[in-house]
Image (tube, rainbow, N blue to C red):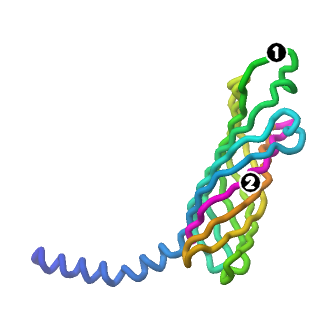
Amino acid sequence: MTPSIRALFALILFVGLCQQIDAQLSRMTANVGAGLTFPSGNFANETQLGMGINAGVGWRFGDHFATSLAFSANALNVNASAVLAQTPVGFTSLQTWSLTADPSVRFNRTHSVQPYLVCGYGLYSAQSSLSERTVLKAGVNAGGGLNFRIDENASLYVEVRVNRVFVGGTDLNYLPLIFGFRWQ
């Protein structure tokens, strides 16, 4: 078979598969966002308001159900007076990151405002600048949000989740309030 015939077969195969590849890619979803992180539970006595970011990529299964692999990073200021009452240490913080599988259910996909519920389970890491000790544990999150459609395949969103990292006696609990952009 000559190179020109192979090229012609490759072109025909490519053109034939384009529609199927496009159909598969149209099911992909991605998001990126940032916002404030609020400590909660017993953890609120030891930390103060912080900041967070998140990003994820995933897959839509129909119009209402999707799942994504999400990365999140949060930094909370440690309340030095509660942790080290007699030693002024200046700026201290607690950094967390997580990698979770996050299924979600979306409602009213045809409307310009679309509520959704989301939960996740995965790996969480926490490190304090006071001790420089890193904890790597399992954790969960659950929450909800609103998508505000700005285009057929794009929306702005606001979301809040409760995160719990299982570290033992006192679990880490915090609530990121995230504003971001979602494709699909």
The answer to which of 164 and 54 lies nearer the viewer is: 54
Cα distance between the residues tagged 1 and 2: 32 Å
Q: Quadrant of residue 78?
A: top right
66 relative position to 76: left or right: left
Q: Amino acid at mark 2?
A: Leu
Please rate how many residues cluster around mark 1, counting C-alpha atoms within 10 Å: few if below 14, some from 14 to 19, many from 20: few
Q: Residue furthest left?
A: 2
Query: Please, what secondary structure does the residue beneath circle 1 have?
Result: loop
Q: Amino acid at mark 1?
A: Thr
State left or right for residue 138 relative to residue 44.
Answer: left
Counting from the top left corner in percent of width and height, residue 70 is at 62, 55
Q: Position of residue 91 (x, y in %)?
A: 71, 26
Q: Which residues are magenta?
A: 168-184
Q: Closer to the camera, 90 or 10?
A: 90
For label 1, the residue is 87
User: Is 53 above or below relative to 172?
Assistant: below
Residue farthest front in this picture: 150
Residue tagged 2: 177
Callout 2: helix, strand or loop?
Answer: strand
Q: Main secondary structure of the magenta part?
A: strand
Q: Are marks 1 and 2 in contact (CB under 8 Å)?
A: no
Quadrant for the C terminus in the image: bottom right
Check the image and report above or below for 144 versus 162.
Answer: below
Q: Quadrant of residue 64?
A: bottom right
| Residue 183 percent across, percent down from the top left | 56, 68
31 drawn magenta: no
Q: Is residue 18 left or right of residue 119?
A: left
Label placed on residue 78: none
